[in-house]
Image (tube, rainbow, N blue to C red):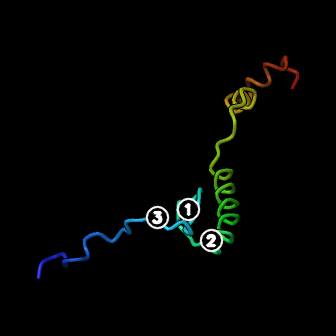
Amino acid sequence: MGGTQKGFQNTQPSYEDPSIKQCPNCMRKFNEDAAERHFPVCAKKAKENAMKNKKPAYNPTLQKAKTMSSSNITQSLGGQY
């Protein structure tokens, strides 16, 4: 007896079941009832993850403030402080 059994080499069905729906977010497949419950939850979770992993937009004013030292800030204000 070798590593594979005869008759079990192709485990994928040769047809697509029209009642099976694929989630556009996670690519998992569900029957129609489960898909109705899963899709909204998965879409919400995907949106939350996208927002959590999103880098903030580049803001040159903020970047400049981060790189300026306190002495540079004092000089830029005319030495008033």
Disc 2 versus disc 1: distance between alpha carbons? 10 Å
The amino acid on which the numbered mark 2 sits, given as a three-letter code, is Glu
Q: Which residue is mark 1?
A: 22
Instruction: Name the side, left or right, on which 23 lies relative to 64.
Output: left
Dot 1: few (<14), some (14–19), or many (≥20) neighbours within 10 Å?
some
The amino acid on which the numbered mark 3 sits, given as a three-letter code, is Glu
Q: Which residue is mark 2?
A: 32
Dot 3: few (<14), some (14–19), or many (≥20) neighbours within 10 Å?
few
Q: Nearer the viewer, residue 22 or 7?
A: 7
Marked residue nearer the N-terminal end (2 or 1): 1
> Relative to residue 39, is residue 72 depicted above or below?
above
User: x and y percent of residue 16 in the render?
Assistant: 46, 64
Q: Residue at x 37, y 65 (%)?
A: 14
Q: Which mark is residue 16?
A: 3
The amino acid on which the numbered mark 1 sits, given as a three-letter code, is Gln
Residue extending furthest bottom? Answer: 1
Element at badge 3?
A: loop
Q: Nearer the viewer, mark 3 or mark 2?
A: 3
